[in-house]
Image (cartoon, grey):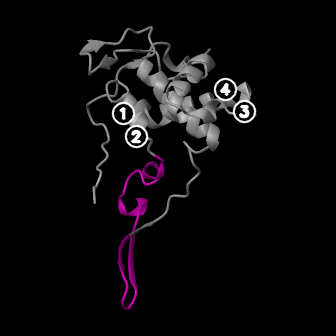
Amino acid sequence: MADHYGDLPGALAYHEARGNAAWSAAGVTDAQRTAALVRASSALDGIYGDRFAGRKTGGRSQALAWPRTGAYDHCASEDIPSDEIPQEVVNAAYEIALAELLQPGSSSPAVTPGRLVKRQKVDTIEREFFGPSDGVPGAADAMRPVLMAVEDALRCVLSRAGGASVDLLRV
């Protein structure tokens, strides 16, 4: 049973085409690359799994979120075959795998959810906090790193209903 998306030759071609020399750097072993792909695939499913349409074709015994039945490609306006792992998902795994190769564990950091500063006053020092006990959901999820290359790669295969969005502020 597969424990990661893509394969080493595909990852090498992907990263070489993008000039990501760290993937094939001297001293990096195939075992390290494979471990990075495994961690990346796990993180990918953990972060985006609830936004993938449909359900696993192999049911609960299937280790990864893909392949799926009932999945849809919004960009091509067509169903994704139930025996297919979309290239977008594989490419997203390759992107996360590079981050994992450079810094193992970076895609699923250990965090201690706590209270966040809501307001801070400097003169006569005043701070106001908020957190999960105040009804703020997903504080830990908000601390996960967001790789925009992954967001871009997955945009066509993520469910449109109820998906999270990222607001960017340009200064």
Compared with residue 80, is residue 120 higher up or lower down, i.e. above or below? below
Q: Is residue 150 magenta?
A: no
User: Which quadrant is home to the C terminus?
Assistant: bottom left
Badge 3 local density, few (<14 within 10 Å), some, or many (20+)? few
SS for dot 1: helix
Compared with residue 39, is residue 109 higher up or lower down, i.e. above or below? below
Q: Position of residue 108 (x, y in %)?
A: 56, 43
Q: Which mark is residue 28?
A: 3
Residue located at (68% from left, 33% from top): 25
SS for dot 4: helix
SS for dot 2: helix
Badge 1 local density, few (<14 within 10 Å), some, or many (20+)? few
In this rendering, would 72 be left or right of 14? left
Q: Which residues are magenta?
A: 118-145
In-front residue for pair 120/140: 120
**Mark 4 or mark 2, earlier in chain:** 4
Q: Amino acid at mark 2?
A: Met
Task: Mark 2 and mark 1 in contact? Answer it, CB < 8 Å.
Answer: yes
**Mark 1 or mark 4, earlier in chain:** 4
Determine which residue is flagged by label 2. Answer: 148
**Mark 4 or mark 3, earlier in chain:** 3
Q: Amino acid at mark 3?
A: Val
Determine which residue is flagged by label 1. Answer: 152
Q: Amino acid at mark 1?
A: Asp
Task: Mark 4 and mark 2 in contact? Answer it, CB < 8 Å.
Answer: no
Q: CA distance from mark 2 to mark 1?
A: 6 Å
Q: Which mark is residue 34?
A: 4
Which of the 4 image quadrants contains residue 75? top left
